[in-house]
Amino acid sequence: MDKEELIKLVTRRVMEKMKDYDIHKVPIGVSNRHVHVSRQDLDILYGKDYELTRKSDLKQPGQFAGNETVTIRGPKGEFERVRILGPVRKQSQVEVSKTDSFRLGIRPLIKESGDLTGTPGLDLIGPKGIVSLSNGAIVALRHIHMTPAQADALGLKDKDMVEVETFGERRGVFGDVLVRVSDQFALEMHVDVDEANAFSLSNGDHVIIRKER
């Protein structure tokens, strides 16, 4: 193989890698501790028929960070000014990191959002009242939101588990990343603060879906 053919081969392979990168890259969203509340619990925390007010939109369509916050209190400690995310849900849920759980004095399970079976509870303290949750505190299972078209392009389906590769100073691989597919989603991988710090990731960084497990 002469020099010109070698250059063409290398160029072709680089272009293939770039195309593969473009198909498989996913933006990161770092989730700090936050709360989702039910209509009933919001009435207790902020007053009957209170409506959440929008501070900023989140990347997922229709979801937003509210101006409203609560104190979350566990057996050993608490965090003040924990933001409520809207809109309201059928059941209240508190998402914390593993590090947060030590201060609160709870042992949350790593769970998909909405799966609250067997999870510990917390007190939510608002300006109008207190809600004592019997369950609902979780460490969120890392996951990727995507549309059906994006899933089809990647050969994936809802509830698949994939590995994801990160880059930079603390390059590594996330295993057991849940794929969540809906036409109501926008492409984004969610990790908590502990995970982001471990891999030196920030909002807007990109990772690569490496392979299906």
Image (spheres, rainbow, N blue to C red):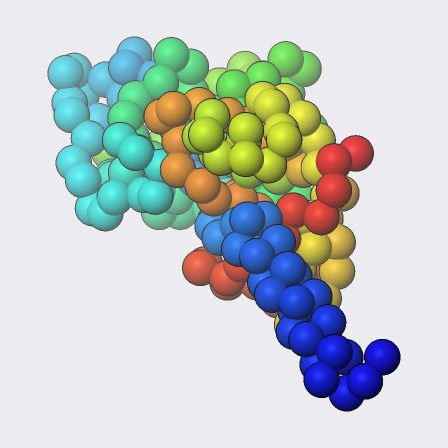
Q: To which quarter of the image does residue 12 belong?
A: bottom right
Residue 67 seen in the figure: no
Instruction: Please identify the residue farthest to the bottom as the structure is shown.
Output: 3
The one nearer the camera, 168 or 57, is 168
Who's the residue at 55% across and 49% down the image?
Answer: 23
The one nearer the camera, 5 or 28, is 5
Who's the residue at 58% across and 17% down the image?
Answer: 115
Q: Position of residue 24 (x, y in %)?
A: 59, 48
The one nearer the camera, 41 or 180, is 180
- Say which quadrant the N terminus sits in: bottom right
Classify 175 as above or below 91. Answer: below
Q: Position of residue 80 (x, y in %)?
A: 40, 47
Who's the residue at 47% across and 44% down the image?
Answer: 188
Q: Is residue 191 left or right of residue 13?
A: left
Classify 69 as above or below 205. Answer: above
- Say which quadrant the C terminus sits in: top right
Total numbered labels placed on residues in the image: 0
Q: To which quarter of the image does residue 74 belong?
A: top right
Classify 148 as above or below 17. Answer: above
Q: Position of residue 122 (x, y in %)?
A: 52, 27
Q: Is residue 167 left or right of residue 38?
A: right
Q: Position of residue 117 (x, y in %)?
A: 63, 13
Q: Is residue 117 left or right of residue 68?
A: right
Residue 204 seen in the figure: yes
Instruction: Please identify the residue farthest to the right as the structure is shown.
Output: 1
Who's the residue at 38% across and 12% down the image?
Answer: 90
The one nearer the camera, 149 or 13, is 13
